Image (tube, rainbow, N blue to C red):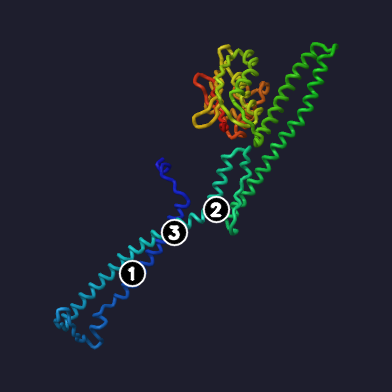
Amino acid sequence: MIIDRLPRLTLRTRLTLVYGALFLAAGLTLLGVTYLLFDQQLAESFVDRYGGVRGGPRERILINMNGHMLTGPEAIQWLQRQEEELRTAATTSLLTQGAVALAVVGAAAAGLGWVVAGRVLAPLRRVTDTARRIAVTTVADHGLRARIALRGPEDEVKELADAFDTMVERLDHSFDGQRRFVANASHELRTPLTLNRALVELAMHRRAASSDVKQLGESLLEINARHEQLISGLLLLARAEHEIADRSPVDMADVVSHVIGQTAWQAEEAKITVHEAAGHAPTSGDALLLERLVHNLVENGIRHNTGDGTGWVRVVSRTTPDGRVEVEVSNTGPAVPPYDVPELFKPFRRLGADRLVTAKSAGLGLSIVRSVARAHGGDVTARPRGGGGLVMTAVLPRAQE
């Protein structure tokens, strides 16, 4: 639509236009009233006022600039001409000079309105800046702890700022409570799961245990392992969403090489070829969390692959010219629609056959990757690879060497 292409006017511009329009309307009204009063004063001519009385016309003697003496009708005609010229000159001067003065003062009023509107909207700009800062700041950076803390008279704008601060404070407490609950609940659930595993293993390894008991034990151990994996993922996710206070130098090239060595048996079982291109990529942060970030990316590339012996995973670490560190993991595999890519980073979201409850993964791997990356001041993106599979890139800030 053509309306959508029109430039959007800011609130400050609209207020300035309103101020200018109101002043212009008031000025035009004042100029019109002045003209009407002026015209009313000139409505009674000099001839009507001085050229006659009730008893009949009274003779007047007038002298013009050339020294000629005029009397009677000639004097009245001369007076009427002078009166008409005076009326025309006065009207022209009033309208012309009044319009010029109105334009000048109107422009000054518009400029003053722009300044006043900026002063009035300054608190709203603080509200907007704070909201934008919270929106772009990660939870690990304590974005919800930002406050407007507006000072000034108790007006509508201050009420809005105070209401916004109250809302953000409640959200901050809510998210903190949620993270503490997840961490505490996950920690408490690990004990009974460990106890269950020990009891099942004890029952399986008894001499009198039948084959049915052993088969049931293996199934229970598999279910218990998935639950332990889920609990561990929740604990790691809760930890990753906190600020990384203790940072140490980490070269992502060493992390990539270490992770590829750890996951070599998984790649061999899945008949996946892993290509390594570990370039120097210095960053800083929690080494264990960064290792988990790369491990989840590589494990995801191995798990979601072709499965026919022709699949591969390529892991690259590098430093970009703009001073960032990147870890890129690309793999072959089934085609992923672009609209499904954002769903990959949401907790407990799986694509394709992995949506089933019996899936091996807990659905937290990429959520943990994004949380770890953002906790370190970076982010992770994904895009479909031509021919199937994904290209996932984790971006981290480069450490000063």
Crowd rating for badge 1 (residues with CA inside 10 Å; few <14, some 14–19, many 20+): some
Residue 353 visible in the displayed image: no
Q: Is residue 100 left or right of residue 294?
A: left
Amino acid type assigned to the residue bearing label 2 in the image:
Pro
Give the residue at x 73% y 31%: 186
Crowd rating for badge 2 (residues with CA inside 10 Å; few <14, some 14–19, many 20+): some
Which of pointers 3 and 1 lies earlier in the amino acid sequence?
Answer: 1
Q: CA distance from mark 3 to mark 2?
A: 19 Å
* Residue lying at the far right of the rendered structure: 208
Q: Position of residue 212 (x, y in %)?
A: 79, 13
Q: Nearer the viewer, mark 2 or mark 1?
A: 2
The residue at which mark 3 appears reads as: 112
Which of pointers 2 and 1 lies earlier in the amino acid sequence?
Answer: 1
Query: Camera-side residue: 255 or 10?
Result: 255
The tag on residue 35 is 1
Is 34 located above or below residue 10 in the figure?
Answer: below
* Residue lying at the far front of the rendered structure: 401
Crowd rating for badge 3 (residues with CA inside 10 Å; few <14, some 14–19, many 20+): some
